[in-house]
Amino acid sequence: MPYLQLEVIRNYPYETKQLLAKKLGVLYSDIMKVDQNRITISIRELGEGSIWRCSNTEPMPAAIMMCDIRSGREANTRALLSKSIIAICNEVLDLEAGQLNIEFTQHSGDEMYHQRLGGFSADWSADEGSI
């Protein structure tokens, strides 16, 4: 954890997805004050017509990012992260303005097991980013 799951309607080259993962990892680490080794990012290319945002008129093509994170960050920190993620995705993936929504699910540390990091995560604390 964190686990950022991006669902899009286009296919992208390997290098584009790797660049996006790098930029998002650095961004998340910086804003959320966490070791980059904890971050996992998936990019699901579901194809044209697979994700729709409903409206009062016609549904429009959409993209969504689900962010499973450890609880403890304030709403303004998550808002900054969301705006920054949207800017990076719009730039790297050429998404349209208003296409990407971000949703958060917050967990305690003991709901995330990292084999590579030796077990369950600790609950997040503000001191973590200074280590």
Image (cartoon, rainbow, N blue to C red):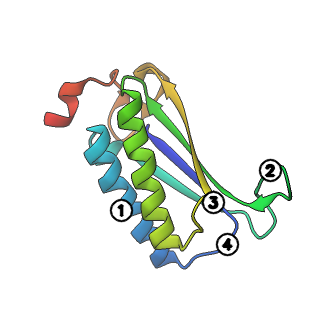
Task: Report which quarter residue 108 is drawn in.
Answer: top left
Q: Split into 4 quadrants, where in the image is the C terminus?
A: top left
Q: Residue placed at 32% from the left, 53% from the top?
A: 27
Instruction: Residue type at mark 1: give it.
Output: Lys
**Alpha carbons under labels 4 and 2: distance apart:** 19 Å
Q: Position of residue 63 (x, y in %)?
A: 65, 57
For numbered disc 1, what is the local secondary structure?
Answer: helix
Q: Position of residue 39 (x, y in %)?
A: 39, 46
Task: Note whether residue 68 is visible.
Answer: yes
Which residue corresponds to mark 2?
A: 54
Which residue corresponds to mark 3?
A: 99
For numbered disc 3, what is the local secondary structure?
Answer: loop
Instruction: Residue type at mark 4: give it.
Output: Arg
Q: Earlier in the sequence, mark 1 or mark 4?
A: 4
The disc label shown at residue 10, or none: 4
Q: Residue placed at 33% from the left, 32% from the top?
A: 118
**Alpha carbons under labels 1 and 4: distance apart:** 19 Å
Instruction: Residue type at mark 2: give it.
Output: Cys
Q: Earlier in the sequence, mark 1 or mark 2?
A: 1
Q: Is residue 112 above or below residue 40?
A: above
Foreground disc of the pair 4, 3: 3
Closest to the observer: 40 or 4? 4
Q: Position of residue 11 (x, y in %)?
A: 64, 74
